[in-house]
Amino acid sequence: MAISTRLTQRFGIEHPIINAPMAFAAGGELAAAVSAAGGLGLIGGGYGDPAWVEAQFDRAGNTPVGCGFIGWSLAENPGLLDRVLARAPRAIFLSFETPDRLAATVRDAGVPLIHQVQTVEDARRAIDQGADVIVAQGAEAGGHGEKRATMTLVPEVADLLAANAPDTLLCAAGGIADGRGVAASLMLGADGVVVGSRLWASNEAQVHPNMHRAAIDASGDATIRSQVMDIVRGKLWPERFTARVLRNGFTDEFHGREDTLRDQGDRLGPAWTQAWADGDVSLANTFVGEATGLIRGIEPAGKIVADMIEQAEGLLTRHR
């Protein structure tokens, strides 16, 4: 089964599904598995560790994959972008306050530029930066984002593109975890979807088993958007962005008491980092979105992609 859209046609893929380039979780194995399943696989370059990124491209082998970065963080290490472009990636995915010069570097290299946005104003800027694909990310998403909801942001950006940049493709992100989300996104005007949490819950994702279990046991009600995880890790994110995670004792204690946390950062930072490595979900937070309530188990990425497309195609056929 397959669903043909402008995204599949432009990138020569079978299914209009891109895995979110989730920092730390989306390594070479996950990206390669998504590409092999007919989607567009992306490595999560995250905060820009050159050795880790290079290793993940090696793990992807000969399977064509792309790479995503946190824009403001990549700006502090622009040489990494040159190294990734030398790998001939399928696409570069940039998000979160990306400087114009980074977008220009990608365009000059002839590599497709995917730009994730959280507001309509962000989308206008992405058009100006020459994005080939704009991803409208709703606040339902796991990890970092802002305030708009997927259901309203996607069609608003679709209308903006139709009027101002009709050749620019649109993907939806945030809360898309099964074929219902894929079908709904296409009906809202998207050419495809970016899937995070559901593919985070795959065999190939680099996620501690304890965090997978916590996500399976949780509903979307158990998530929270907060800055405390960035404060404790010393990550200087722009004020506008927060991260969605599962609530735990740490967020219960410090969300809303950020100044207190800053005062205790030297003590708590190493403890939180060690808890992350150990999979101690009572202290370290599980980075997953509201779609956690739709996750029933950990499966191969290829099966997740196939199941999503099969369900979406059935729904779209039924409503034609």
Image (cartoon, helix red, strand yellow):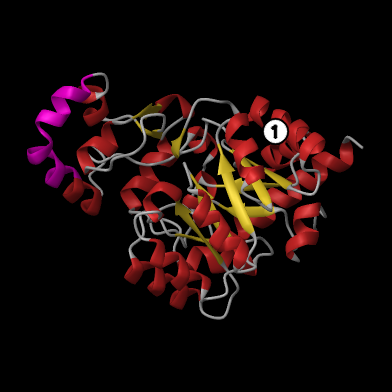
Q: Is residue 264 above or below residue 18?
A: above
Residue 109 horizontal/vertical position (percent): 60, 69
Which region is colored magenta? 257-272
Could you say which is closer to the camera, residue 306 or residue 191? 191
Could you say which is closer to the camera, residue 320 or residue 147? 147
Residue at x 33%, y 54% (from the top left corner): 208
Whether residue 266 appears in magenta in the rendering, the answer is yes
Farthest residue, direction top? 256
Residue at x 27%, y 23% (from the top left corner): 255
Tell me the residue that label 1 is attached to.
157
Farthest residue, direction bottom? 62
Q: Is residue 44 left or right of residue 158?
A: left
Residue 280 horizontal/vertical position (percent): 22, 44
Q: Is residue 81 above or below residue 289?
A: below
Q: Is residue 90 left or right of residue 180?
A: left
Residue at x 34%, y 55% (from the top left corner): 76
Instruction: Count residues near mark 1 (Cα–Cα under 10 Å), then give few for <14, some for 14-19, many for 20+.
Output: many
Q: Does any portion of residue 91 appear in the rendered image? A: no
Amino acid type, callout 1 = Val
Q: Is residue 180 left or right of residue 57?
A: right
Q: How many marks?
A: 1
**Please, what is the dominant secondary structure of the magenta stretch?**
helix
Residue 113 horizontal/vertical position (percent): 62, 57
Whether residue 269 appears in magenta in the rendering, the answer is yes
Q: Quadrant of the N terminus?
A: bottom right
Residue 107 horizontal/vertical position (percent): 62, 61
Farthest residue, direction left? 267
Q: Quadrant of the C terminus?
A: top right
